Image (cartoon, rainbow, N blue to C red):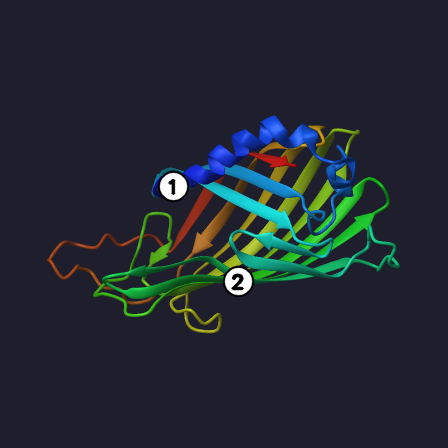
């Protein structure tokens, strides 16, 4: 996998957040226990996050790193901005802060795009996203969550491109989509430290529709330690592992310029080390 860097504005905003987060009004402060967090951030709260991952795939021996930035802003106590062009709305809330009756679980829907732009070669491009999230607080020590999501890449007029698998079995094409289901359980150990367990499956498709022909499927599991020493910052670190598989189908063997296309194995296994930091104010 190639190296991806978090947008500069995300890193700069995260550093600035560390200096001003402690000035947040008490009504917008999180507790130091991550299991107390609601499914959306509180009204007028801003969150900036950066997550890093280092991957290793076998038997291809592919290695790489990625850095992903995140931004959230609470518009109301039920509606938040996730990224610049995506909204998440809490339909149900099992820990309401506005006096409403607690529901059996929290449920939110997300819709929007992770990016939008224009290319002189391909015209308009979009990175649409849609998701449903469920969250359940169990006692004062556990949270259980489940997420079903779809995201895609769409370009108006794709240029001539020969799709191919890379050495991590990700299929590179100009239009594609990913559907996935992820579940997580978090256990609070004390007032500042928690441990999380996760598992998920996903499927890459060779078009924007989530129902078209699949080009790879994967599954994985993770464990992480989460530390919130103060109400305005959270650190996390852990590891994950999984497997990815592609169909046994006839594939192109040469690019238009005559270069050979490497035939990748049907299945790869992967492991990763993960670390992240999030600021709130």
Q: Quadrant of the N terminus?
A: top left
The residue singled out by tag 2 in the image is 112
Q: Element type at marker 2?
A: strand
Relative image position of residue 152 (x, y in whole percent): 44, 62
Tell me the residue at 55%/45% (across/down): 71
- Left or right, 272 with respect to 21, comes to left
In front: 29, or 245? 29
Tell me the crowding category of disc 2: few under 14, some 14 to 19, or many 20 or more residues within 10 angstroms, Cα based.
Answer: many
**From this viewpoint, is residue 247 visible?**
no
Residue 31 in which image quadrant: top right
**Residue 174, numbered circle:** none
Tell me the residue at 88%/54% (across/down): 99
Tell me the residue at 78%/42% (across/down): 36
In front: 157, or 17? 17
**From this viewpoint, is residue 235 visible?**
yes
Q: Earlier in the sequence, mark 1 or mark 2?
A: 1
The residue singled out by tag 1 in the image is 4
The tally of labels here is 2
Say if mark 1 contacts mark 2, CB within 8 Å.
Answer: no
What is the spatial separation of the Cα atoms under label 1 and label 2, in whole angstroms? 22 Å
- Left or right, 96 with respect to 118, comes to right
- Left or right, 229 with respect to 269, comes to right
Relative image position of residue 94 (x, y in whole percent): 82, 55
């Amino acid at each position: 996998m190639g190296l991806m860097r978090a947008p500069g504005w995300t890193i700069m905003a995260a550093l600035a957040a560390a200096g001003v987060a402690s000035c947040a009004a008490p009504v917008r402060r999180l507790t130091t226990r991550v299991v107390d967090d609601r499914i959306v951030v509180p009204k007028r709260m801003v969150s900036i996050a950066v997550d890093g991952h280092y991957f290793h795939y076998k038997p291809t021996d592919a290695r790489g790193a990625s850095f992903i930035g995140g931004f959230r802003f609470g518009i109301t106590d039920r509606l938040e901005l996730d990224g610049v062009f995506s909204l998440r709305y809490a339909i149900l809330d099992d820990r309401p802060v506005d006096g409403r009756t607690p529901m059996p679980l929290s449920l939110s829907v997300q819709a929007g795009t992770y990016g939008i732009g224009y290319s002189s070669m391909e015209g308009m491009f979009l990175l649409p996203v849609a998701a449903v999230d469920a969250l359940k607080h169990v006692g004062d020590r556990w949270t259980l969550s489940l997420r079903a999501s779809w995201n895609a890449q769409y370009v108006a007029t794709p240029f001539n491109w020969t799709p191919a698998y890379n050495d991590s079995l990700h299929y590179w094409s100009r239009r594609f989509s990913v559907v996935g289901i992820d579940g997580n359980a978090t256990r609070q150990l004390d007032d500042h430290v928690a441990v999380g367990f996760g598992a998920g499956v996903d499927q890459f498709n060779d078009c924007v529709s989530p129902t078209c022909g699949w080009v790879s499927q994967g599954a994985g599991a993770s464990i992480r330690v989460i530390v919130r020493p103060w109400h305005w910052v959270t650190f996390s670190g852990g590891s994950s592992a999984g497997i990815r598989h592609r169909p046994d189908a006839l594939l192109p063997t040469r690019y238009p310029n005559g270069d050979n296309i490497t035939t990748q194995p049907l299945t790869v296994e992967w492991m990763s080390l993960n670390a992240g930091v999030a600021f709130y104010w």
